[in-house]
């Protein structure tokens, strides 16, 4: 196969994934390269260069002919005026995780409108079952498949169309988009080579992830679940992405190759190893590969095994057969076989995920499963946080003044506060109710995002803002005591949600919410109409606040030490396991140090400032200056990482450290880490008992006329 590692390849990558490939596609391409070009049988050529594809003839029911007319429109800087930012927006909305904001949705809608009539053609063409580009597989590694990049981009367009429709409440368009995307996955799978199966798999995974989000949301009715199952029918079956057929066809491509060992090594970027292999001519390569037909058939059969264990057993047996039968072991670069392991693991993992999803959808459709109970609470808590952040400055200020009892009954701002709180019934409060109704009470906010952000001030600020909205409304005299108690319980649930997902940021915010709950509980305890029954319900709600590790400080500390030990171990050579020494050293480090290092060394994004608005601001917990300092330290760390990578690329030999004891090397390394202190968390941990005591004391209050 002739690989175009020039501008044509660059063009394909821009189309496949604007600016930067997604993790799935990146993995796919790395797998292909790891196959040492024995499994990498196609070149992702520039989709603008369609002359390399064999003519197809009349369209009929063959989607391939229609795609040829569509591909020129799916380009960066085409006549539609789509920019790189537009493609980025489409890709982000298509992924659905993390859920796009309203602003991102608006940008995505504008980007999609630029596609014009091409969008309808993408949808209709994706629905056709047959897709044959009439490739000549006898070309071997010289064969090109320029359509793959554009077809993957088409899947993202369909994914964005689906999620935009869902945001607008258009279930029919959503189902049509999911069905088209699922069928597009089967179209790509009809190209019987491994890269096609990998891309088909990634397209199918996109549809499954978006459907799984609906399950996690807990909002599917039996009717909707049945329709969704029907739309995703192309993804069902033992091997919907054609892995087994692709593996068989790989041998055809391999045996048809006329390249010598040097050309193959250069094609795969594998010029530093296996020199004897590179010296072989094309005839010698061919002679060594002929006996491998049976091995490839055995590898293909691995994808028909019932489980990964049986598949790997057959895989190992096939490799053993290859080693015994090879007439020229030098011609067999074994490095591509571990990549088959990756494909098998991916195949069975996705199969298990697909089967579980389909079984769940079937259960909801039949009424055997309660969709609401399957809901993931983090989704609804994050929506409540986003809804609180969406309030404008005036709305936030008036609600906060009301919560702080800084607004008189004759204040002109009172009507604004009441109107705002009433409007929250269908947003903030509805989302909190949905979160509290979820059967699972364990919250994992990290699952909503692909980024690891230890200092997510937007999330915690919004969630505390949602709790504050509930507390403010609980203090309105127009509500009876039972309604006010329900609102206080919402704030308690918000605090507990952060506690159940232990990080220092969550612990500090949970504690802050609890301290504000104490004030509202005090107001509630002395209000008119509070019965002993309501007091009992209040006590039960307060009892849900964990006492052994209130707010999760200790859990966060223990969890963080373990995570840091594993992550920091990567700063040492792989031949020496430093985990034990790092665990011992980190046990001696203070909580402020651990917190700062977690943000600087583990955050995938630059720490952002607190969200705007008096209601959602976290400036009282994390001062703006401390956030700026930690952000500057994070930036300095990224610069150092870039320099370290340059050294690695230049193959600079590291300083020999094997003679220095491990514990000394660890101490030397940790002593170089000197991040700014964001907050002395030890002081906050000392306030835990006071925070709990203030709630208990407030709950024990009685009206004066009851004495």
Image (cartoon, helix red, strand yellow):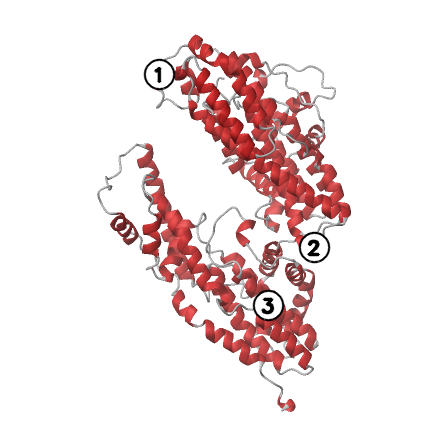
Q: Which residue is mark 1?
A: 276
Name the residue at the left extreme. Answer: 659
Mark 1 and mark 3: Cα distance apart in space: 69 Å
Q: Residue at x 33, y 59 (%)?
A: 589
Task: Judge by depth and name the residue closer to the eye, 685 or 539.
Answer: 539
Position of residue 291 relative to residue 640, above or below, is above
Per the rendering, the mark at residue 372 is: 2
Instruction: Please name which of the two marks, 2 or 1, marks the residue nearer to the observer.
Output: 1
| Element on which disc 1 rests | helix
| Sequence-first disc among 1 and 3 | 1
Q: Are marks 2 and 3 in contact (CB under 8 Å)?
A: no
Q: Residue at x 54, y 63 (%)?
A: 616
Task: Judge by depth and name the residue closer to the eye, 322 or 100.
Answer: 322
| Sequence-first disc among 2 and 1 | 1
Q: Residue at x 70, y 37 (%)?
A: 232
The quarter of the displayed image where residue 89 is located:
top right
């Amino acid at each position: 196969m002739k690989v175009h590692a020039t501008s044509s390849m660059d063009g394909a990558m821009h189309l496949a994934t604007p600016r930067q490939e997604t993790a799935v596609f990146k993995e796919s391409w790395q797998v292909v390269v790891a196959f040492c070009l024995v499994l990498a049988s196609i070149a992702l050529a520039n989709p603008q260069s369609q002359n390399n594809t064999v003519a197809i003839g009349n369209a009929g029911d063959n989607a391939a002919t229609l795609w040829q007319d569509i591909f020129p429109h799916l380009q960066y800087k085409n006549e539609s005026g789509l920019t790189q930012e537009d493609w980025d927006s489409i890709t982000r909305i298509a992924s659905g995780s993390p859920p796009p904001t309203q602003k991102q949705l608006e940008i995505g809608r504008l980007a999609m409108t630029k596609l014009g009539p091409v969008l309808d053609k993408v949808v209709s063409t994706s629905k056709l079952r047959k897709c044959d580009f009439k490739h000549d597989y006898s070309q071997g590694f010289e064969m090109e498949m320029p359509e793959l990049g554009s077809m993957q981009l088409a899947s993202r367009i369909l994914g964005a169309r689906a999620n935009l429709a869902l945001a607008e409440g258009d279930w029919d368009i959503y189902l049509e988009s999911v069905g088209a995307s699922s069928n597009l996955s089967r179209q790509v799978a009809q190209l019987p080579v491994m890269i096609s199966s990998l891309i088909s798999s990634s397209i199918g995974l996109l549809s499954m992830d978006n459907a799984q989000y609906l399950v996690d949301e807990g909002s599917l009715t039996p009717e909707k679940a049945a329709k969704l199952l029907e739309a995703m029918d192309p993804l069902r079956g033992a091997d919907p992405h054609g892995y087994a057929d692709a593996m068989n066809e790989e041998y055809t491509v391999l045996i048809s190759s006329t390249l010598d060992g040097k050309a193959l090594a250069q094609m795969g970027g594998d010029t530093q190893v296996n020199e004897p292999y590179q010296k072989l001519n094309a005839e010698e390569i061919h002679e060594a590969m002929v006996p491998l037909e049976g091995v490839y058939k055995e590898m293909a059969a691995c994808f028909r095994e019932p489980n990964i264990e049986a598949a790997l057993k057959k895989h190992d047996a096939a490799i053993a057969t290859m080693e015994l039968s090879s007439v020229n072991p030098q011609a067999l670069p074994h490095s591509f076989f571990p990549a088959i392991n990756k494909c098998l693991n991916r195949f069975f993992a996705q199969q298990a995920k697909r089967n579980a999803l389909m079984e769940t959808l079937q259960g909801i459709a039949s009424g055997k499963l309660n969709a609401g109970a399957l809901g993931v609470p983090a989704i609804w808590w994050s929506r409540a946080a986003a809804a609180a952040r969406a309030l404008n400055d005036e709305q936030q200020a008036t609600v906060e003044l009301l919560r702080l009892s800084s607004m008189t009954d004759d204040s002109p701002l009172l009507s604004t506060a009441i109107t705002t709180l009433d409007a929250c019934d269908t947003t903030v409060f509805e989302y909190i109710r949905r979160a509290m109704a979820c059967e699972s009470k364990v919250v994992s906010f990290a699952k909503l995002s692909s980024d690891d952000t230890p200092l997510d001030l937007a999330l915690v600020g919004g969630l505390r803002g949602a709790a504050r909205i509930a507390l403010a409304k609980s203090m309105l005299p127009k509500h009876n005591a039972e309604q006010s108690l329900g609102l206080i319980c919402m704030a308690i649930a918000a605090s507990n949600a952060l506690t159940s997902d232990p990080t220092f940021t969550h612990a500090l915010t949970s504690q802050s919410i609890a301290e504000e709950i104490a004030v509202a509980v005090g107001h509630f305890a002395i209000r008119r109409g509070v019965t002993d029954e309501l007091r009992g319900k209040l006590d039960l709600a307060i009892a849900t606040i964990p006492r052994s590790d209130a707010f999760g400080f200790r859990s966060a500390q223990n969890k963080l030490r373990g995570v840091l030990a594993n992550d920091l171990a990567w700063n040492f050579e792989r031949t020496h396991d430093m985990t034990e020494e790092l665990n011992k050293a980190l046990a001696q480090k203070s909580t402020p140090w651990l917190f700062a290092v977690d943000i600087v060394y583990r955050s995938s994004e630059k720490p952002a400032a607190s969200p705007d608005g008096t209601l959602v601001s976290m400036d009282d917990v994390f001062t703006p200056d401390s956030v700026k300092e930690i952000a500057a330290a994070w930036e300095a760390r990224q610069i150092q990482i870039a320099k370290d990578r340059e050294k690695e690329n230049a193959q600079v030999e590291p300083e020999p450290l094997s003679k220095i004891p491990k514990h000394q090397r660890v101490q030397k390394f940790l002593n170089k880490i000197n991040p700014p202190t964001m907050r002395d968390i030890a002081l906050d941990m000392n306030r835990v008992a006071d925070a709990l005591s203030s709630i208990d004391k407030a709950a024990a209050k009685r009206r004066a006329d009851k004495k």
